[in-house]
Amino acid sequence: MSVISARHRVENLSRKRLGITSRAKNGMEMTIIGYDGEREVTVKFEDGAIVSHRGYREFVEGDIAHPTNTVARRLRLNHINETNRANCGLMMKIIAYNSKTNVDVAFEDGIVKRGITYRSFRTGEVAHPTAPKNRPFPISVYGFTLQTKAYEYNTELNYICKCNRCGLRDVMTTDEMKKHICKGVAYEGRVLD
Ligand SMILES: [Zn+2]
């Protein structure tokens, strides 16, 4: 087939195929709005989303993914389990990434904060409702009693604290308290708070 007739064929098909509708696997109707060859189909979903460079066969079989199911989902999944330290000293983890202005995080003590911005997550500016920093002493956390702040080092707060199980008195961060294993005391694995 010569270049000219190949082009002619594409143009013929384009005339026939523009405006054809099909149902995507997500249930939405999609319409061909651009056709420049068997592998160069542009479709528009009923909600207005446009996807280009797809195959005509995929279109017919409804096998074209809606962009929110691909790009956005991939973006969301990429952020799940991302961790950062909040300014109060506690670690937080992303448990849902709905959009960059609607993120849910769980603090290491289990408190969940919803609807924060991804930016505030990155900068650590997420207020924990009962963070040690904001609570009056003594504070009970991870089986420890925190008497007072000792010092701040590398942006981490260290507390003068006592283990409620083994009686150890020390200066520790909340992270160290969490990882603390009592020596010589059987407490049946129970975590007191
Ligand atoms: Zn202990």
Image: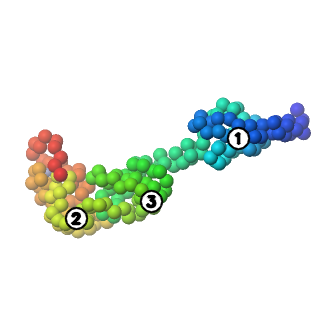
User: Secondary structure under badge 2?
Assistant: loop
The residue where tag 1 is placed is 31
The answer for how far apart the CA atoms under marks 1 and 3 are is: 35 Å
Select label 1 or label 3 by which is in front.
Answer: 1
The answer for how far apart the CA atoms under marks 2 and 3 are is: 24 Å
Quarter that holds the N terminus: top right
- Badge 1 local density, few (<14 within 10 Å), some, or many (20+)? many
Residue 146 x/y as whole percent:
17, 61
Q: Is residue 158 left or right of residue 63?
A: left
User: Secondary structure under badge 1?
Assistant: strand
Q: Is residue 82 left or right of residue 193?
A: right
- Badge 3 local density, few (<14 within 10 Å), some, or many (20+)? some
Question: Residue at position x 49%, y 56% from top?
Answer: 100
Three-letter amino acid code of the residue under disc 3: Thr
Q: Which of the two labelled residues, at mark 2 and mark 3, occupies the earlier sequence position?
A: 3
Q: Nearer the viewer, residue 43 or 185?
A: 43
Q: Which of the two labelled residues, at mark 2 and mark 1, occupies the earlier sequence position?
A: 1
The residue where tag 3 is placed is 117
Picture disc at residue 135: 2
The answer for how far apart the CA atoms under marks 2 and 1 are is: 58 Å
Three-letter amino acid code of the residue under disc 1: Thr
Three-letter amino acid code of the residue under disc 2: Arg
Is there a contact, CB below 8 Å, between mark 1 and mark 3? no
Picture disc at residue 87: none
Q: Which of the two labelled residues, at mark 1 and mark 3, occupies the earlier sequence position?
A: 1
